Image: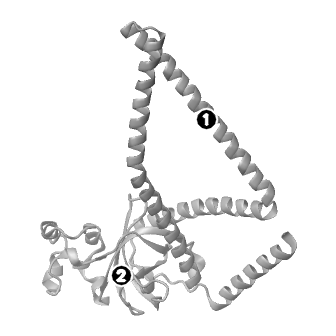
Amino acid sequence: MDKVNVTKNKNRRVFFRIYDEVNLFYQKIDEEQLTEPYLDVDSLANIPSLSTDVERGSQYSALLPGLKKNRPDIATPEVLFNESETCNVNISVSGMAFSCEEALKEGDYLAIKILLASGMAVIVTFGKVVYCKNIQAIDSQHPYFVGAHFINMKDEDRELLTGYVAKKRSQQIRVRGLILAAAIAVIVAPDVVIGLLLELLHFLFEHFLEIIHLSFEFIELNLDHLVEHLFHTDLHQTQVIVFYTIATFVVYGLYRLLRALPSFYRRCKNSLLSACAHQKASLLYYWREQSLTNKCKLIVIGVAAVTCYVFFGM
């Protein structure tokens, strides 16, 4: 592996790119530090994700013994990386694009640690900033959009990232294919699709009610036999005991359901907002990376498709 193995790629689209969520940690470094032994990539991999424990920081200070000696401005290794929550990135084997809070300059070098969405793989490498755009009007929390090329990436990390990108790309293609097929079906025959959906919902609802009725009858019959066997009651007494027993369980179940509904609603709301934010960020990442010509092409194609559907499809 070369000391500064910059990926020489004039066409950034040679490598497949995916939009994904990762935990990203980075720190701006000097170019000389790329070849300094105390800033070795292997040592960076052992830096903890959460850097709030002072004892843990002293534990990891042994991993980078030359860091404090050569860089007295850095007190402990735990401040080496800026930490962000799970964020959206556009990543390939050659580089990545991400949003951040600080303005980076073209040509800046970064030490990068990436925890992939699977949580089972960590990529540690260096990167060189190739552009930094101000997007404050779109995202005030992370006003800068940065693109970086990976350099000095180890062969095993490159193979791991290649496999991960290929797997995620195939998954995204399948999902997008299903979404596209559903969208085409709705556009071509909306009445047929809506009719089929309503029939399916009616079928499921009917069978759901039937299952509930059969379950209630089964429970009531078994409770009748159990009460008669245990207490030797007549029919009227058995029915009264079974009724109040079932009513007690129903009231308790409704009580637990009402208590669980708010937290369930919050989880669903947070999941929906997270998914919407992820899709919005992915679309914004894709749009930002397009040239002016490609943006014009996308706009023209979209307007033409809507116009044709309005005039000829409806």
Rendered view: 267 above or below 208: below
Q: CA distance from mark 1 to mark 2?
A: 68 Å
Q: Residue at x 44, y 34 (%)?
A: 250
Q: Could you tell me which quadrant the N terminus lies in?
A: bottom left
Question: Residue 278, image x and y in percent?
Answer: 50, 70
| Residue named by callout 2 | 3
Rendered view: 206 above or below 42: above
Q: Label 2 near label 1: C-beta < 8 Å?
A: no
Residue situated in front as seen by the camera: 313 or 148: 313
- Relative to residue 55, is residue 47 drawn left or right? right
What's the amino acid at mark 1?
Leu
Rendered view: 305 above or below 264: below
* Secondary structure at numbered mark 1: helix
In front of the other: label 1 or label 2? 1
Task: Identify the mark nearer the N-term, 1 or 2.
Answer: 2
Q: Residue at x 75, y 55 (%)?
A: 194
What's the amino acid at mark 2?
Lys
Question: Residue 179, image x and y in percent?
Answer: 66, 61
Q: Quadrant of residue 14?
A: bottom right
* Secondary structure at numbered mark 2: loop
Query: Which residue sits furthest front?
Result: 236
| Residue named by callout 1 | 209
